[in-house]
Amino acid sequence: MEIIEQTHELLGLPENGLQLMEKAGRTCYKSEDKITGDSAERFVAMLVKSGHHAMIEFGDMVVKLVTNRGVTHELVRHRHCSFAQESTRYVKYDGQMEFIRPVWCSDRLVGSWPEHASVPPGFTPAEQVWMQAMARAESDYKTLLQNGWKAQHAREILPNSLKTEIVVKANIREWRHVFALRCAKASHPQMVALMLPLLKEVQTKIPVVFDDLVF
């Protein structure tokens, strides 16, 4: 089995996003004559500060996340997003199964582990239990396949720690909502560890719509 880290990848940001948001916003005020080559950033900053967030819905952001099934179960509750997720019905995990390292466990877990190998000393009892559970899930899953079960049947024993890939698309306003919920201290630590680096990256790409989000 393979223990890996969760990651994110920005697949798409709104092209001319600030200009589009400005155009939409100025339609409300009929102030299109005030548009200049450098007015978009100031205008959108005003929209965000004043809470006129409907205008920042005119820009979509697309992200690919590699994380565990437990995190994606929470993400898909954001109803204003679109999702494309790796399917355990159609993907057959008959090779080396991948699991996401829990962020509260040692990063020394990351790497390839021989099937049926015992967990070496130096890990906490809880980490050893988790590793053994993942190894057992992988072994039992393959046994079910060997006994005639299809992938959509054998998935019944797959754990929340199983690696999954999900592409998420949402407008900027919804992403602000996602970050506000999923970067907060009350959120699950695995989710926070995934979303905070994403937020920091988009703050460098389009800071005017995300810079006020501080955690």
Image (tube, grey):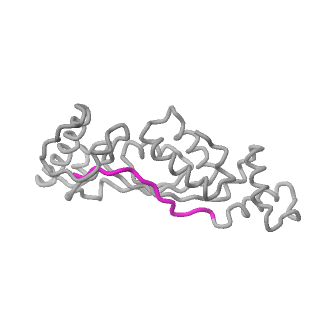
Q: Residue at x 51, y 63 (%)?
A: 11
Residue 109: quarter of image = top left
Is residue 199 toward the left or the right of residue 91 in the image? Answer: right
How many labels were placed on the picture? Answer: 0
The image shows residue 156 at horizontal and vertical percentages of: 25, 44
Task: Specify the principal SS of the magenta part.
Answer: strand
Q: Return the residue nearer the eye: 8 or 17.
A: 8
Q: Residue at x 61, y 59 (%)?
A: 205
The image shows residue 127 at horizontal and vertical percentages of: 26, 36
Is residue 114 toward the left or the right of residue 189 in the image? Answer: left
27 within the magenta span: no
Q: Which residues are magenta?
A: 1-14
The image shows residue 68 at horizontal and vertical percentages of: 36, 47
Q: Return the residue nearer the eye: 74 or 18.
A: 18
The image shows residue 96 at horizontal and vertical percentages of: 21, 56
Q: Quadrant of the C terminus?
A: top right
Is residue 131 toward the left or the right of residue 172 in the image? Answer: left
Residue 35 lies, with reference to residue 49, above or below; the image says: below
3 within the magenta span: yes
